[in-house]
Image: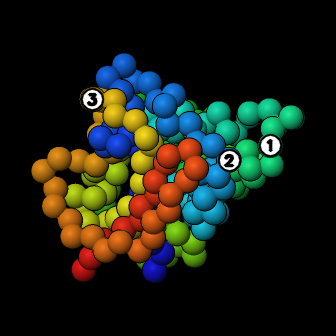
Amino acid sequence: MARLTYLMLASLDGYVVDEQGNFDWAEPDEQVHLLVNELQRQVGTHLYGRRMYQVLVAWDTISLDDQPSFIRDYAGIWRSADKVVYSSTLDSVSSSRTRIERSFDPTAVREMKATAERDLSIGGPHLAAEALRAGLVDEISLFLAPVIIGGGTRALPGGLRLDLELVDERRFDNGFVFVRHRVAG
């Protein structure tokens, strides 16, 4: 059975965007990006909420001329994976290997996990909250940026308790810290 992982960059106080929707403080440097690439290379299918998809779809068409190798590598990883976008408002998608689902169905995601040959990832804090509450997420990976932003969209949902087991951690020269936890049980 494939794993469903949730990977997100967040501020130290646990937000993915500030109150104005900005996330410029979360730009990964080469060292961080290399680990993101390593983790995302294991993923065959990405599950995205509409907003997260609309941010990441730029990787489908971004000009790779004059880009460093780690950026070109990530673009290739993103382009080669299947993508499912959960949206009740999006009319179409502009990236290859992408389909829209109108609502999040935990039973369908369980079936995807049971039949997938490669891991799945879930992106976007609102969609991830649904998957976490449904007991679908196997691992949570957070890249914590060395900044406190004081408010915005939380990386993890309130009102949910999960026991976790730390399976990896790393420090980066830019002050980011990576933690990866397996959901216990």
Residue 107 appears anywhere in the view: no
Other-residue count near label 3 (Cα within 10 Å), few / some / many at <14 / 14–19 / ≥20: some
Q: Which residue is mark 2?
A: 30
Q: Secondary structure at mark 1?
A: loop
User: Which of these two is toward me, 185 or 172?
Assistant: 172
Q: Quadrant of residue 152?
A: top left
Q: Which one is in front, 185 or 176?
A: 176
**Circles 3 and 2 in contact, beta carbons < 8 Å:** no
Residue sitting farthest toward the left: 159
Asked whether residue 13 is in view, the answer is: yes
Q: Please name which of the two marks, 1 or 2, marks the residue nearer to the observer.
A: 2
Seen at 81% across and 38% down, the residue is 67
- In the rendered structure, which amino acid carries the disc numbered 3? Gly
The residue carrying mark 1 is 68
Element on which disc 3 rests: loop
Rounded to the nearest angstrom, the CA distance separating label 3 from label 2 is 27 Å
Q: Amino acid at mark 2?
A: Glu
Tell me which numbered mark, 3 or 1, is placed earlier along the sequence.
1
Contact between marks 1 and 2 (CB within 8 A): the answer is yes
The residue that mark 3 highlights is 151
Residue, far top: 20
**Residue 33, horizontal then vertical, whole percent:** 63, 50
Q: Amino acid at mark 1?
A: Pro
Mark 2 burial class by Cα count in 10 Å: few <14, some 14-19, many 20+: some
Classify the position of the C terminus by image quarter.
bottom left
